[in-house]
Amino acid sequence: MIDVNALIGPYPFRQIPHPDADVLVRVLDREKIGRAWVGHLPSAFHRDPTAGNKELFAALTPHAERLKPVPAIRPDWPRWRQSLAEARDAGAVAIRAYPSQWQLGPHDAAMAELAVACGEARLPLVLTVRFEDLRQRHPLDVAGDLTAAAIRSLARAGEEVRLVVTAAGREMIEEIHWSLTPAEQARVLYDISWIWGPPEDHLAKLFQTVGSQRFVYGTQWPLRLTQNPRANLDLLPDELANAQLGDAEKF
Amino acid sequence: MNEPLIDCHAHFLHERCGRSDWQEVNAARFRAGEKIGVTCHVASILGTYGFMSPTYFPSPADVTLGNDAMLAMSKATSKGNEKIVRMMVTVNPNHTDHALAEIERCVKAGAIGVKLLASRRADDPLLDPICRLAAQHGLPVLHHIWQHRRREWPNQEISDGADLARLAARHPKVIFILAHIGGGGDYAHTFHALEESPNIYPDLSGSGVDRGMLDDAIKALGAQRLLWGSDVTMCTGLAKLRALETTGLLSADDLKDIRWRNAARIFRAGSFEGAA
């Protein structure tokens, strides 16, 4: 099991307990999760992610077997292609981007270029729909959720594109999935961190319609309880109890 | 029976709520409840859930319709049945006479508490007659809450912990259940707002599973003030149940209190016969 949606570092809008790499390793042990793709949470809110990426690689180095770096690349920043190449060479397993926080719109050409470039480098692009529930956000947290329009635009950007969409709910996933051709659909995986279980059974319905192979395990630690996606899987109806999730590492 | 587990905040649908899948949703709650180990669902029905009148402002006719369906469901469950359901009677305080009559009618038929939505601000005087009747019958009042309201939201007259605290201060003999600390808004505001309101017990339900929320609730209010519940996302309820065991802040007795003993204490004696 791989957690594709873990982060380290503090969050600007509320205190989160112990968002550190060594704590994450202990949590993975407790939850019996093998590895995690790990991003640097503060970088989503920094203008320049360069320093955050350095912090990320340094923090994960002692835990290289378990924690895989997912640095952020900002495609409207000078020399971003070189940063991408350096990240790949340094062992990044994927790339994170935050178009909402960077105010890059749904049809931003730079984002499309980044998605294609990541695909050519065999690095999935990890997108974050939200960090917190809309209803609790700090008055200064005005970025808004990443939209389905932005995601489908990236999925259509090129054959090489591979997207891992995190923190999306059922409606958004359905909008994205059914607005794409079968070939485009195959370019997108979704983590299950923000999909509800019973009694509405959103996760079960998505497994039945979109297919469980389009979904991967994600917790959004340290913002959210690590126990949540496991609980969701445990509460699937019996007929879906053995549903197989997709494999982000072979994506 | 394993360790009891009382879901203090559950809802069921019914055939007049405008959804053809209402039975599947109810069945899913029971299915998940069995897996989680829920021994009693303390539940309400919110009118017609927007089909004939707004969910949070249900018409008197819809209130009665929902309560009738809830009564039928709670009567269909009994001691020895794995699907034990207890009823909270839903009322809209804007219709005082109807609300009071519904409470009397449903309590006689077995309701164990009152459910208030977001039909009127929690500290509004219109809630006083309802609270007086709740005190007379020993009924806890579950009040829908937005954790820190900073503005109005459509289709509801939302209240927060500070609003409920003012109502609770006027009715010190009534136990209030503050709905879903994970149900939207800033729960940190709620914990501060309740510090001097010993007759308010927050439930842990809601879709929010922020790390730190449970720890902060325990530290601010203590395990003896918290109730486990699921509301409409039972997966997050199970996640919180499991997370409670890892906080390092709770003894085995504390866990029992949150799982069921606090509920058993605040509801009338015998409310959970066969379930806890």
Image (cartoon, coloured by chain):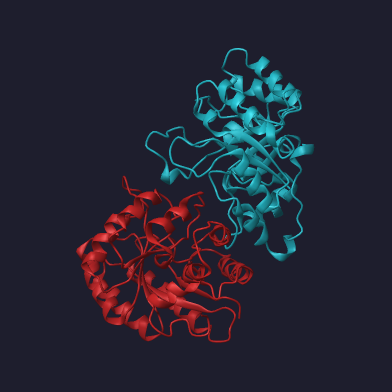
How many marks overall?
Answer: 0
Q: Of A12 and A117, which appears nearest the observer? A: A12
Say which of A48 and A123 sits in front.
A48
- On screen, residue B114 versus residue B163, left or right, reads right
Report the front residue among A208 and B115: B115
Q: Residue at x 56, y 72 (%)?
A: B38
Residue A37 in view (yes/no): yes
Residue B129 screen position, x and y as percent: 22, 72
Q: Residue furthest top?
A: A78
Give me the residue at 62% from left, 13% from top.
Answer: A79
Residue A182 locus on image (x, y percent)? 75, 38
Q: Residue A13: name its quadrant.
A: top left
Colour of chain B in the rendered structure image: red
x, y percentage for residue A169? 57, 47
Residue at image location 49% in from the left, 80% down from the top: B74
Left or right relative to A221: residue A46? left
Q: Is residue B177 above or below residue A117?
A: below
Establish if B74 lies above or below A171: below
Picture quadrant of residue A134: top left
Seen from the viewer's position, the closer of residues B228 and B10 is B228
Horizontally, residue A118 falls left or right of residue B198, namely: right
Q: Which chain can be seen in cyan?
A: A
